Image (spheres, rainbow, N blue to C red):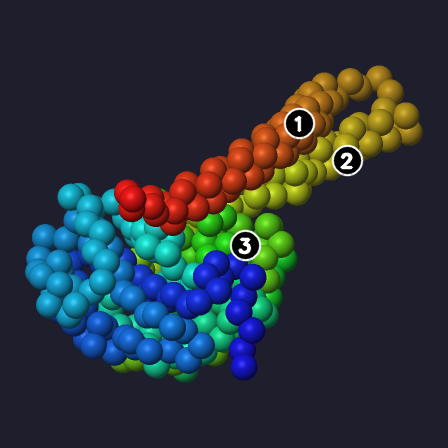
Amino acid sequence: MLKRPASVRSPVMTKLIIQIPCYNEEKTLGITLSELPRQVPGIDVVEWLVIDDGSGDRTLDIAKSYGVDHILRFPTNQGLARGFMAGIEEALSAGADIIVNTDADNQYCAADIPKLVQPILRQQADMVIGARPIWQTSHFSTAKKLLQKVGSWVVRLASDTNIVDAPSGFRAFSREAALQFNVFSSYTYTLETVIQAGRRGMTVVSVPIRTNPQLRRSRLVRSIPSYVFRSGVTILRIFMLYKPMRFFLTLGTVPFSLGALLSLRWLYLFLFIDSTRSRAPSLILAAVMVLIGFQLWMFGLIADLLAANRRILEETQLRQRRRDLDAQQIKPEPPS
């Protein structure tokens, strides 16, 4: 018999909520919902949650026609990351012990949901990410495959995890893990949540999953140059936010080292070649480079202090979230 995870609150039953962020998905949402399970081994209750991110088509009607248990609707489009976080908050409020996130375009094989939740049920993981067969996926271009690999490598470096497919949106979270997420990016949540989990000491694992034939083009990857730029900005921002000291130390070392080398060159030329020449331009450039490097190091120190303050605020927010959710679970006693 499987042991229940520490994050599961109820001693009686375990609730799984499968959330699907949607934006104008009338053509694919029905297919996705028809594949979702209503029963999962080790789970007592399975519910569905659709986040309608300001759709202008029949997405909402289709969700209702398939008997979706929870629907969260934005009047205007807020973006994937905000839709994801709103879904997490809604699922927690609805009493989810485990949350599974999947896409509305039926990219991921819903039959693999039991594989996602099993490590959490067995107390082997706080977060599970489905690893797609990237190199076997025919509709992925070679450039996209390489970018997926590079992005996953960078995330592993920043998060101290061994995640194989960091951009994968097919993932499961324990209740305790979901409580700790704060997504700052408006582009996507995938990379940032992995890094937050790793930095907070959560156990993050990958499981191999299957994918379905492509029903529509990706909205995140509209063009390779755009995807490279936006992913690069996201990764750069992640490093600045979560590893500021390492980022600015590395960045500052380059100009500082160049300035130091120029200073040594000037000193050598002055002492051993020709002391009558001032070589002022070289000396000024060396001083400027050393100063730039030193300033970048100071920026790293300040950013590291700010990061420590942010961690304190996140701990305070986590305690408040727990209190708020616990208060929601307390039902008033009926009058006698």
Secondary structure type for disc 2: helix
Closer to the camera, 144 or 108? 108
- Identify the residue under disc 2: 261
Q: Quadrant of residue 47?
A: bottom left
- Identify the residue under disc 1: 298
Secondary structure type for disc 1: helix
Secondary structure type for disc 3: helix
Tell us which disc is closer to us: 2 or 3.
Answer: 3
The amino acid type, in three-letter code, at marker 1 is Met
Neighbour class for label 1 at 10 Å: few (<14), some, many (≥20)?
some
Q: Residue at x 64, y 30 (%)?
A: 305
The amino acid type, in three-letter code, at marker 2 is Leu
Dot 1 or dot 3: first in sequence order is: 3
Visible in this render: residue 293? no
Mark 2 and mark 3 residues within 8 Å of each other at the beta carbon: no
Neighbour class for label 2 at 10 Å: few (<14), some, many (≥20)?
some
Tell us which disc is closer to us: 1 or 3.
Answer: 3
Q: Position of residue 125 (x, y in %)?
A: 56, 66
The amino acid type, in three-letter code, at marker 3 is Ala
Q: Is residue 285 left or right of residue 59?
A: right
- Identify the residue under disc 3: 197
Alpha carbon separation for disc pair 2 and 1: 21 Å
Q: Position of residue 293 (x, y in %)?
A: 67, 31
In what quadrant of the picture does the N terminus appear?
bottom right
Mark 1 and mark 3 residues within 8 Å of each other at the beta carbon: no
Dot 2 or dot 1: first in sequence order is: 2
Q: Residue at x 20, y 65 (%)?
A: 68
Mark 2 and mark 1 residues within 8 Å of each other at the beta carbon: no
Q: Is residue 52 left or right of residue 130?
A: left
> Looking at the image, is 183 positioned above or below residue 218?
above
Q: Position of residue 167 (x, y in %)?
A: 43, 62
Q: Residue at x 50, y 54 (%)?
A: 176
